[in-house]
Image (cartoon, rainbow, N blue to C red):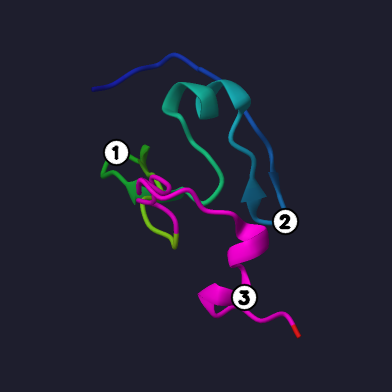
Amino acid sequence: MSSDRIDAESKVSGNQANIPARIRRELDIDDGDQLRWQLEDDGSIRVQVIQQQTGTFANFDGYAGEEVTDVTSNHDSWGVNVE
C-alpha cells in the first residue's frame, strides 16, 4: 500500500524522534511498546508496532476466590515480613 499523504511530522533530537500524538492514538501505542523498523527497497520505511504483552501482571485478572481477604490482618500470615 503506497500513500503520499502526510499524517504528522516530528523532529529528530539526539537520535530520538517523538511519535506524534495523533499517530500514537490511532495505533494505540503506549509506553513499553516496541517499534520494528524496516527499510524498503524503494527507500521508504515501514514501522510495525509490537505492543507489550508480557510482564509480571500482564495476564493477572485479580483475586477471583470466594474468601474475603484483608491485607492488614493477613499480611504477616502470607509470609511477608517488613521488619
Mark 2: secondary structure: loop
In the shown orientation, is residue 74 left or right of residue 56? right
Q: Position of 4 compared to 73: left or right?
A: left
Identify the residue under disc 1. Answer: 42
Q: Is 81 one of the magenta-colored residues? A: yes
- Residue 22, horizontal then vertical, whole percent: 57, 20
Q: Which amino acid does label 1 sit on?
A: Asp
Mark 2 or 3, nearer chain start: 2
User: Which residue shows up at 65% across the image and 32% down it?
Assistant: 10
Secondary structure under badge 3?
Answer: helix
Camera-side residue: 45 or 24?
24
Q: Position of residue 46 (x, y in %)?
A: 34, 39
Q: Distance between the residues labelled 2 and 3?
A: 49 Å
> Mark 1 and mark 3 in contact (Cβ < 8 Å)?
no
- Looking at the rendering, the stretch of residues picked out in magenta corresponds to 57-82
Quadrant containing the N terminus is top left
- For label 2, the residue is 14
For the residues labelled 1 and 2, the Cα–Cα distance comes to 26 Å
- Disc count in the image? 3
Query: Extreme bottom residue here?
Result: 83
The answer to if 58 sits in the magenta stretch is yes
The residue that label 3 is drawn on is: 76
Which mark is first along the chain, 2 or 1?
Answer: 2
